[in-house]
Image (cartoon, rainbow, N blue to C red):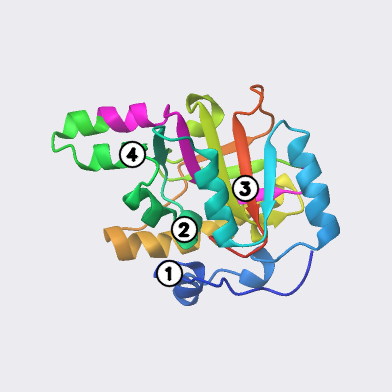
Amino acid sequence: MANVTQQMEKATEYSATNLMADAGADAERWNRTPDETTLRKTIEAIGARNVRVILVDSAEDALRTVVDLIPKGAEVMNGYSTTLVEMGFDRVLKENPKGWRDYHAVITGEDDTEKRHALRRKSVAADYFLSGVQAIAESGEIVGCDKTGSRMGAWPHAAAHLILVSGTNKVVPTIDDALRRCREYCLPLENQRAQHVYGIGSYIGKHVILDHEDVDGRVTLVMIRQPLGY
């Protein structure tokens, strides 16, 4: 692994760089960019687990790739992801040039609490579900964590197509390191974001590990040669 911690180009209000001081997270350890040999080995290991990997150079390339992957008129849902925000996906979703059925807009537009909860449960089975990831082991496992599971529920089976996005800064040597990254790096940063946005802290209530995908073509990981997200 390379020792140089890179700066994300398009920091937003809740990017890691703006939360780091208060979070006390160890960026030198957990936000490192892998060398080319490690990156290629990791991509091969992910592919061997039946997850397609598309490697792109920039956030702009990642955004174009994601938009191209989702057909016109498709049903789309996404869990909150700093990476998606840094890519500009929230803007594209608002503009919606391909006429997607934006499940998130449907949910937030529903005033009835019970109906809104029902829609949230159904949304994990959307045609296309987009999510960031918290860690990727060099051995190919992809790890996500969440407080309630709302961002992770689509991963194992529910979504017809799962599109994951990740900067290469989330690659770590082992699955144990991946779980530690969730606890020691992602959680402190997310805790800071949650306090700013919701007025309460956060915790890890759920972990999901993508170890192997049975359905050909269901899961795509867009990996970005930039340190995006946390």
* Gap between marks 2 and 4 measured at Cα: 18 Å
In this rendering, position of residue 89 left or right of residue 120:
right
Q: Which residue is mark 1?
A: 12
Which quadrant of the figure contains the N terminus?
A: bottom right
Q: Nearer the viewer, residue 163 or 119?
A: 163
Q: Residue furthest top?
A: 214
Q: Which residue is mark 3?
A: 222
* Gap between marks 2 and 1 measured at Cα: 8 Å
Disc number lying in front (1 or 4): 4
Can see residue 150? no
Q: Does residue 134 belong to the magenta stretch?
A: yes
Q: Residue furthest left?
A: 111
Which quadrant of the figure contains the C terminus?
A: bottom right
- 228 versus 63 height, above or below: below
Q: State the image quarter where residue 125 is shown.
A: top left
At a point 48% along the width and 25% down the height, the residue shown is: 158
Q: Which residues are magenta?
A: 118-139
Q: Which residue is mark 2?
A: 82
